[in-house]
Image (tube, helix red, strand yellow):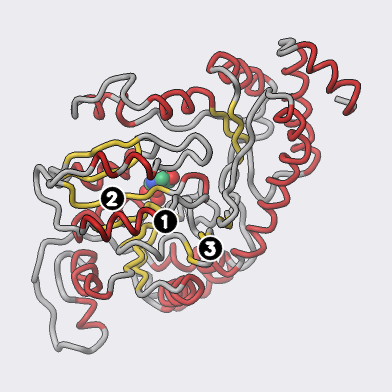
Amino acid sequence: MKIPFNKSSLTGHEMEYMAALLRKGDLSSDGEFSQKCTALLEQKYSIHRVLLTPSCTSALEMAGMLCDLRPGDEVILPSYTFPSTANAIVRLGAIPVFVDIRPDTLNIDEDLIEVAITDRTKAIIAVHYAGVSCNMDRLVALARKYELTLLEDAAQGVNAFTDNQALGSIGALGAYSFHSTKNYGCGEGGALCVNSPALVERAEIIREKGTNRTKFLRGDIDRYSWVDIGSSYVPSEIVSAFLLAQLETIESTTQKRKTIFEFYNYHLNHLQDYGLMRLPFIPRNCRTNYHLYYLLLPTAELRTELMTYLNEMEIGATSHYVPLHTSPMGRTFGYETGDLPVTEDLSKRLLRLPIYPNLSEPEQMKIISEIKSFMLQRQVLKTQANVIVRGREL
Ligand SMILES: *Cc1c(COP(=O)(O)O)cnc(C)c1O
């Protein structure tokens, strides 16, 4: 691809921090760089405790364990998400109860949650698609009313807000991703946001192989031992040195993504006005991090044709999730095609466009003009298209 779907970029101090660490020598974990990353996230987003992890997947696994899920427990989540959201609970024997999404934000439809709650329901997982918040007021109220644990898969939601609350800081636990396809990345990385103080101690133990080593390192106890089930959910300090550079430049990275996002909006808006596509929707109380830019085409056929056309033009436009409930694993829980109509429909009509800080304006212009020329070539709603040609120098 001449214009790939995603490209990671250095933001300034990555090499310097990694070199400094290598000179110092202790590469294992939770050193100076990890501590700086942690403090930065805790302060910036008012999170009680941040624990860096090797991925968002591992943070979600920890969250599942901290919910004390047992076989047969049910957890409510959207189907329109990455498999890690469901794996976190399924690996503990819990049953995923998939709920349809809202057509505007593609987030879980808060109006459909209450009917999905049973006396086996233990938790709700909010997935903030594209860095746009779920309706957290409603989810928090439902969790409180039915005494459920609210988890946030905020893999895409770092530095995004609802009203003035950071995503990941609202539920009992939140999970961030620093995978290189996300906004602020270190190759592979993540964090568990522990917002409920009562869960901190056990979270530290699970993360450190089931031992109370973290307490020992703080000097609270004079030796550590095996106290609970755990695993190794600790990233190397090499990764944290890289991550710190990315976290320190969160605002400038976000600003660059915002410029690209708004440039697409500006040039594609009239296609939306003519009903040829729908552009991303951001509720007024949400502040996004501009994680994704997507189009919703009028039909699945048109989406696939446009995707093929852009790929032929060497532009990395791509679809997104195969709904989990229609995937081979999802079907083992008894789901069938037709169960979640909005999810199934939108997933077939959605196309993601390249958005990353190093995407140049000429590259973006090329993407936009290829989209417009496709729309004309296919003579999609020919009359309207002609109006666009005359009116807007298409
Ligand atoms: C990327 C992503 C994950 C997985 O993140 P990793 O850091 O790659 O483990 C989980 N959930 C959602 C919604 C994601 O977008």
Task: Name the residue nearer the viewer: 34 or 356.
Answer: 356
Q: Are marks 3 and 1 in contact (CB under 8 Å)?
A: no
Helix, strand or loop at disc 2?
strand
Q: Position of residue 394 (x, y in %)?
A: 85, 25
Q: Position of residue 375 (x, y in %)?
A: 73, 18
Label 2: which residue?
124
Label 1 Cα neighbours within 10 Å, binned few <14 / some 14-19 / many ≥20? many
Q: Which mark is residue 191?
A: none
Where the N terminus falls, by quadrant?
A: top right
Q: In 3D space, how far apart are the residues under numbered discs 2 and 3 (Cα atoms)?
A: 21 Å
92 horizontally vs 279: left or right: left
State the residue at coordinates (13%, 79%): 224
Q: Which mark is residue 136?
A: 1
Task: Name the residue nearer the viewer: 150 or 256.
Answer: 150
Helix, strand or loop at disc 3?
loop
State the residue at coordinates (36%, 54%): 139
Label 2 Cα neighbours within 10 Å, binned few <14 / some 14-19 / many ≥20? many
